């Protein structure tokens, strides 16, 4: 039986919200930062949120590996093999957190058969969350309720792209120019996947380095909303790769990716 069938989505969303509340407590105060071995920033908010998520997933899903960003940075890298596992980024968009623009997220994803089959992306400072479950659809959650979301039917002559606010690179700019993108909007963290998932943009190209915990939850939301995420070779972006590192990819909405990436 699939692990997905045993997951209570509402309970998992509540877990993400608990982690988000811990992040907001730090956000309202002094968000001290230190540097990890790869020079990327980390705050106590990352660590508090990850501890909350790990404790609950470990209790509710004993024996299921959890690959979480800060644990991996500390050298705790579980073996996942071909079994289901969780991917957790407790605070995606630490730079956005530090600049206080609100564009940071809590990401929780379930991977089965190397595919993200469930994802939660919570933007605690914005009061919004997105969830996606494979073959069941995607939802946007706010204080006044939840509603289904879906990718929009794109006009190939007037494509709108969303690109990274903090990690824009020349390769992305060249791709945007080559594909005649009509307009580009910037966003932080996994909000880029969610913008495509709910029809605010048509495509999100990313060629700079990312890790699996950066993308799994957003990919699950987007694919549940009718989109897809492809590598530069045109294959679906899969998981449990060596080192949990992603290649470059393009996340598409309602436009069939008939062009060369």
Image (tube, rainbow, N blue to C red):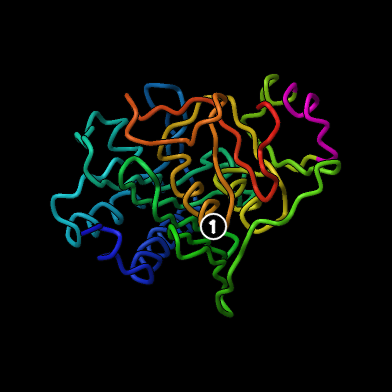
Q: Which residue is mark 1?
A: 123
* Residue 84 x, y percent position in the rendering: 25, 47
Answer with the quarter of the image where residue 95 lies: top right
Q: Which residue appears at 65% of the width and 52% of the height?
A: 195
Residue for point 43% across, 60% down: 133
Locate residue 53: give its quadrant: bottom left
Q: How many marks?
A: 1
Residue 182: x and y in percent read: 85, 39
The residue lying toward the viewer, choosing from 87 and 114, is: 114
Q: Is residue 21 above or below residue 182?
A: below
Asked whether 211 or 255 is in front, the reply is 255
**Residue lying furthest left in this view?**
63
Q: Residue at x 48, y 45 (%)?
A: 31
Q: Which residue is at the front of the view, 95 or 33?
A: 95
CA neighbours of label 1 inside 10 A, class few (<14), some (14 to 19), many (20+): many
Where residue 215 sits: x, y (%)?
48, 41
Lateral position of residue 87 relative to residue 133, left or right: left
242 shown above or below 32: above
Q: Quadrant where the N terminus lies?
A: bottom left
Query: Residue placed at 49% from the left, 25% from the top?
Result: 247
Q: Residue furthest bottom?
A: 144
The segment highlighted magenta reads 174-183
Report x, y in % for residue 258: 68, 35
85 vs 46, left or right, is left
Q: Residue furthest front?
A: 258
Locate residue 209 relative to residue 244 in the image: left or right: right
Q: Secondary structure at mark 1?
A: strand
Q: Quadrant of the C terminus?
A: top right
Q: Is residue 102 magenta?
A: no
């Amino acid at each position: 039986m699939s692990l997905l069938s045993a997951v209570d989505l509402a309970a998992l969303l509540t877990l993400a919200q608990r982690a988000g509340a811990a992040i907001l407590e730090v956000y309202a105060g002094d968000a001290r930062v230190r540097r990890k071995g790869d020079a990327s920033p980390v705050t106590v908010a990352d660590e508090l949120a990850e501890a909350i998520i790990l404790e609950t997933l470990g209790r509710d899903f004993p024996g299921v590996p959890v690959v979480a960003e800060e644990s991996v940075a500390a050298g705790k890298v579980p073996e996942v093999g071909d079994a289901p596992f969780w991917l957790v980024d407790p605070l995606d968009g630490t730079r956005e957190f530090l600049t206080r623009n609100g564009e940071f997220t809590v990401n929780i994803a379930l991977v089965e058969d190397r595919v993200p089959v469930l994802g939660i992306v919570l933007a605690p400072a914005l009061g919004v969350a997105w969830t996606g479950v494979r073959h069941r659809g995607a939802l946007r959650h706010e204080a006044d309720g939840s509603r289904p979301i879906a990718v929009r039917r794109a006009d190939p002559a007037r494509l709108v792209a969303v690109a990274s606010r903090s990690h824009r690179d020349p390769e992305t700019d060249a791709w945007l120019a080559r594909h005649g993108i009509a307009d580009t909007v910037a966003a932080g963290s996994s909000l880029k996947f969610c913008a495509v998932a709910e029809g605010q943009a048509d495509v999100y190209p990313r060629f700079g380095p990312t890790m699996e915990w950066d993308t799994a939850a957003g990919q699950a939301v987007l694919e549940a909303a009718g989109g897809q995420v492809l590598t530069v070779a045109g294959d679906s972006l899969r998981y449990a790769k060596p080192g949990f590192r992603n290649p470059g990819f393009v996340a598409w909405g309602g436009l069939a990716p008939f062009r060369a990436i």
